[in-house]
Amino acid sequence: QVQVVESGGGLVQAGGSLRLSCVASGSRFNNYIMAWYRQAPGKQREMVAAITSGGTTNYADSVKGRFTISRNEAKNTVYLQMNSLESPDTGVYYCYINRLGFSVWGQGTQVTVSS
């Protein structure tokens, strides 16, 4: 069974940093797109960052220059380094993987940025 598990969320002051990790299991993931989404209270889930197997990245405009997505194929892991965090970054962050229409979501990890 394919699954992904996030870790690394927490409470941080504005201007601080966090690194999220997502470990995938149950298959080989070298051909999957791996991404991070987030959902703030009362808002729709939105894409934060994504990375292809070839290393091409895509970011939401709101996080460009502050967040960096990366992946370690050998560890089936995708990371999200978040710097200069702001209150609007608060939300539940979800790991998402996709290949040819097959997708899996993680359970999410809470990130709270205090001002």
Image (tube, rainbow, N blue to C red):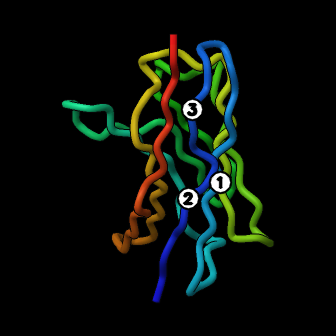
Select label 2 or label 3 by which is in front: 3
Q: Quadrant of residue 105?
A: bottom left
Q: Mark 2 or mark 3: which comes first in sequence?
A: 2
| Dot label at residue 6 | 2
Q: Residues within 10 Å of mark 2 (few under 14, many from 20)?
A: many
21 left or right of 35?
right
Q: In the structure shown, which secondary structural element does the residue marked by tag 3 occupy?
A: strand
Q: Mark 3 or mark 1: which comes first in sequence?
A: 3
4 left or right of 105?
right
Q: Which residue is mark 3?
A: 11
Frontmost residue, 60 versus 7: 7
114 left or right of 54?
left
- Residue sitting at 40 percent across and 62 percent down? 107
- Residue sitting at 59 percent across and 14 percent down? 14
Residue 71 image offset from top left, x and y in percent: 71, 55
Whether tag 3 and tag 1 are in contact, CB under 8 A, the answer is no
Frontmost residue, 20 versus 113: 113
Seen as rendered, the residue at the extreme left is 42
Q: Mark 2 or mark 1: which comes first in sequence?
A: 2
Q: Which residue is mark 1?
A: 21
**For the residues marked 3 and 1, what is the alpha-carbon distance in whole angstroms?**
16 Å
Q: Is residue 37 above or below residue 85?
A: below
**For the residues marked 2 and 1, what is the alpha-carbon distance in whole angstroms?**
6 Å
Whether tag 2 and tag 1 are in contact, CB under 8 A, the answer is yes
Specify the amino acid type for callout 2: Glu
